Image (spheres, helix red, strand yellow):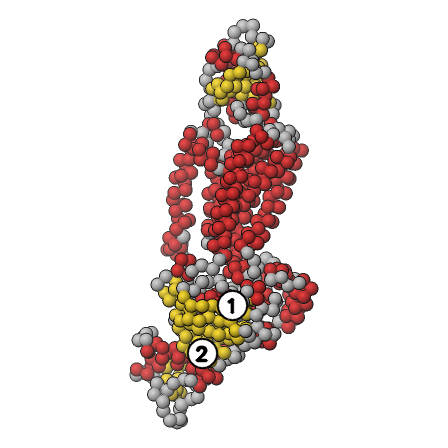
Amino acid sequence: MSWGVRDLDVRFGEHRALQGVTLETPNGRVTGVVGGDGAGKTTLLRCLVGALTPDAGQVRRPDSRRIGYLASSSGTYPDLSVEENLAFAAMAYGVPAAEARTRADEYLERAGLAAARDRLAGNLSGGMRQKLGVIRAMLHRPELLVLDEPTTGIDPVSRADLWWLIASAAAEGAAVVLATAYLDEAERASWLLVLNDGRTLAEGTPEQIAAGVPGTIRVSSRRPLDEAARRSWRRGATWRIWSPETARAESGTVRPDLHDAVTVAALADELDGGVERGDAA
Amino acid sequence: MIVKEFRQLRRDRRTLAMMIFLPILMLVVFGYAASFDVTTIRANVVGPQAERLAAVLPVPFEVEEVDPAGDRADAEMALRDGEVPVAFVTDPGGVTALLDGSELFIAKAAKASLSNLADQIPAGITSRVDVLFNEELETSAIMVPGLAAMILLFVGTVITSLGVVRERQAGTLEQLAVMPLGPWDVFLGKIAPYFVVAAIDMVVVIVAGVWLFDVPFRGSVLVLALGALLFLFVTLGIGVLISSVSQNQGQAIQLALMTLLPQVMLSGLIFPLSSMPGGVRWIGYVLPLTYFIQISRGVMLRGAPIDALWAPFLYIAILGAVVMGLATLRFRRSLAPGPPRRRREREPELQGAAR
C-alpha cells in the first residue's frame, strides 16, 4: 500500500505555500522532506495527516486510527508523566492496555527513557520530550508515521535513539515521512523530496539527488569576488563554486554530495526564477 | 522596553479594545446597577378588607393582585412561588404583612416602610409583620445559595475557558485533531472533569452553608440538583465557547471575566433587580446566573416546588441548548481541518536551512 499526495496546492492568503507537490510514501520506506525556512515542509505534512485541507490536489492517507503524527511541537502534555502521556495515546488509538504497556516498555528502554517513565513530560529535556513524542506517535503501530522535524535541536546521542525508533517503525511496515532541515540527517532516509518556496526541487534517493547535480562544483580556499559569488557557498574552511556548464573532471572539482546537490538545486532555482538574494553563501 | 510593550499591545487588539471600552461600559452599566434603594415593592393583598387596604397602600407598595376571598395560605404560597415579595393578609383582627426574607433588601425596605405606615392605620386595627423564609433577615441566608451559583459559574466558565486554549498553546490541539477522536469525544472529555469538580464544590458550599451558617434547605435536593445540572451546562458551554475563540490563556481569562462580572453585578446576587433601571435590569434578565439564583434561593430558602420555578428552568434549559450548540459548532471548527485561506494560518518558522 502506498500513501501520498498528488499535485498539492496550498495558499495562505496571497502566499503559495505549496505548488503542485507530489509525493509517494510506500510502506516500509523512510521518506525525508527537506527544505529551508518556509519551504512548505510542515504544510505538506499537515495536509498528509489531514490537519489542513489543501486548495487543490489529492491526498491518500489511511484512516486516522492508522496514522501517527508528531507535530512540530512534541505534542506531549507537560503536566502528564511519560507513562500517562503514552497511556492517553494508547487509549485514544484503541491499543489494548497490556499491549500498549509492552510496546511502551520496549520503546522507552531502547530510547533511554525507561528511568524517566514517572517524570512529568514538562520536566524532560528537549531531546527526551521529542523522543517521547515519537514513541507516542508510533505506539499504535501506524501504517503512516508522519514526523515534523523530530530531531531538531537535540543532541547526537538522542538523535541516534530517535533514528532507531524511526527505523523500527519502517521495519514494522509503516510508511514514514519526516521533515528535516538537516541534510546530514536526510541522508539516512531512503527517499527524499527537496522543497523550496513550496515547489519540488528534486526527488529521489540521496544518491540519485547527489548524482543529478548539473554543471560542475569547484573548491576554492577563498570566496570569489566576481559574479560567481552568487553561485558560491561555504563548506567548512573552503568555498564551493557552482557553474552550470559541465566541465571535464580536473583538479579542484569535487563530486557533489547531498549537501552540495540541495544547495545547487536551490541556487539554480533562484537564478532561473530571477530571485536574487545577494550573498548565496 | 516601553516601545516593545506598546508594539505588543497594539498587536493584541482585543486586549486594547477591552482596556479602553470595558471600563466605560462597566462604569455606565454598573453605576446604574449598583443600588440597594428599593423604590417599588410589588404586593398581593388578600382577605375581607383587601380592597380597602389596597386602595390606601402608599408608595413604595404597588398592588399586584387583590383577592378578598384569599387567606394567609394563599398569600404564603404566592411568596413561596416567588410571585411577589410582600403580601398583606387582612382579617377582622387586623392586618398582617408577610415579607419574603429571601428577597433581603426588598424585605428590609418593606419593613422600614411598614413601620412608618403603622401611624396611618386606624385605631382598633392591629398590624403585624411576619418575615418568612429568612426570619432574621440574615445576609448569609441569601448569600450561600448565591455563592453556590457563583462557584458553578466560576468553575464552569473561568476554569473551563482555559481548557482548549491550553491545548492550543501547548501544541497538542493539532495532535488531538488528527487523533481518532470525534469532536464530541474531546468536548465531553474536556468538560467532564470540570463538571465533577463544580458539582463537588457546590455540594461542599451548600453543606457548609447549612451547617455553619444555619441556612435553611426547605426544598427538594433533586430540584436544586436539576437546576444546577442545567446551569452547569450553560456555564461549561460558555467556557468552551470562550476557549475556542481565544488564542491564548490571557484572552480566555479576559473574556471569561467579561461574562462573569456582569453576572455578579446584574443577576440579583448582590443588588436587587428591582432596584435597577429598566435598561440595565433587562441585561440581567438575559444572564443565566439571574435564573439560577432564583432557583437556588427559591428551593433552599422558600422550599419552592419545581412547578413554581418553571420559568427560570425553561430559560436555563433553552440557554443551555443554545450555548452548548454554539460551543460544539465552534469546537468542531477548532478541531476540523479547514481550508488554509479561511483560517489565515501561516507556515510556522522553521529552524535551520538546507543550504
Q: Position of residue B294 (x, y in %)?
A: 55, 32
Residue beneath the point at 56% across and 21% down: B99
Few, some or many C-alpha atoms within 10 Å of disc 2 (few <14, some 14-19, many ≥20)?
some
Q: Position of residue B19 (x, y in %)?
A: 40, 45
Q: Nearer the viewer, residue B197 or B84?
A: B84
Do residues under tags 1 and 2 come within 8 Å of each other at their CB atoms? no
Residue beneath the point at 42% across and 82% down: A261
Gap between marks 1 and 2 measured at Cα: 20 Å
The vertical placement of A188 against A216, above or below, is above
The vertical placement of B199 against B218, above or below, is below
- Specify the label residue A85 is tagged with: none
Which amino acid does the dot numbered 2 rest on? Glu
Residue at the spot of label 1: A61
Closer to the N terminus: mark 1 or mark 2?
1
Q: Position of residue B231 (x, y in %)?
A: 55, 40
The vertical placement of A241 against B62, above or below, is below
Q: Chain of mark 2?
A: A
Which amino acid does the dot numbered 1 rest on? Arg
Q: Nearer the viewer, residue B134 or A16?
A: A16
- As helix, strand or loop, the secondary structure at mark 1 comes to loop
- The tally of labels here is 2
Residue beneath the point at 42% across and 61% down: B340
Give left or right: position of B206 versus A234.
right
- The answer, for residue A250, to whether it is visible in the render is yes
- The answer, for residue B143, to whether it is visible in the render is no
Q: Chain of mark 1?
A: A
Same chain for the residues under marks 1 and 2 in the image: yes
- As helix, strand or loop, the secondary structure at mark 2 comes to strand
Residue beneath the point at 50% across and 44% down: B323
Residue at the spot of label 2: A203
